[in-house]
Amino acid sequence: MGSFGSKISRSTKMANSTEIIQFIKYTISQDKVVVFSKTYCPYCHLAKEVFGKVKQPIKVIELDERDDGPAIQENLAQISGIRTVPQVFINGTCVGGGSDVKQLYDSGKLQPMLIG
């Protein structure tokens, strides 16, 4: 009976992971720029400041303010290959974190990504 119980809990976790992955994919498809962030993270602040400089509206998901934040972060790692925050998506594609966004901005490559 114990092993049957384990199978049920694993299935439940998989369903939750599937729902979370669907949430992530839906979210990154709805806005040009989506930032998965934590309110206290300096690299998250850096990414948000860069988008402020170029006056680009962004959708921010503050993981530390959500009950499912840790699960979202875990599933983001499966999608992007990155475990840390921020994770910045432009047009549905992960472009990296705060330093990556700053580097794109400094090199002049960020603004063309935001057009269209």
Image (spheres, grey):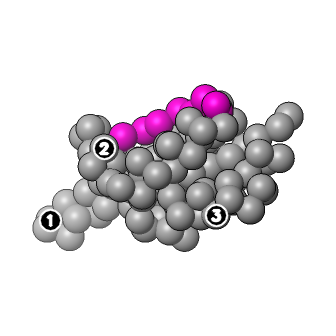
For disc 1, the marked residue is: 1
**Who's the residue at 14% across and 67% down the image?**
2
In percent of width and height, residue 38 lies at: 33, 48
Q: Is residue 52 above or below residue 81?
A: above
Of residues 3 and 10, which is closer to you in this image? 10
Q: Which amino acid does label 1 sit on?
A: Met
For the N terminus, the image quarter is bottom left
For disc 2, the marked residue is: 39
**Who's the residue at 83% across and 47% down the image?**
112
- The residue lying furthest to the left in this view is 2
Q: Is residue 26 left or right of residue 6?
A: right
For disc 3, the marked residue is: 103
Q: Which amino acid does label 3 sit on?
A: Gln
Tell me the element at label 3: helix
**Who's the residue at 78% across and 56% down the image?**
109
Alpha-carbon span between mark 2 and mark 1: 43 Å
Using the rendered image of the protein, determine whether residue 58 is visible from the camera's viewpoint: yes
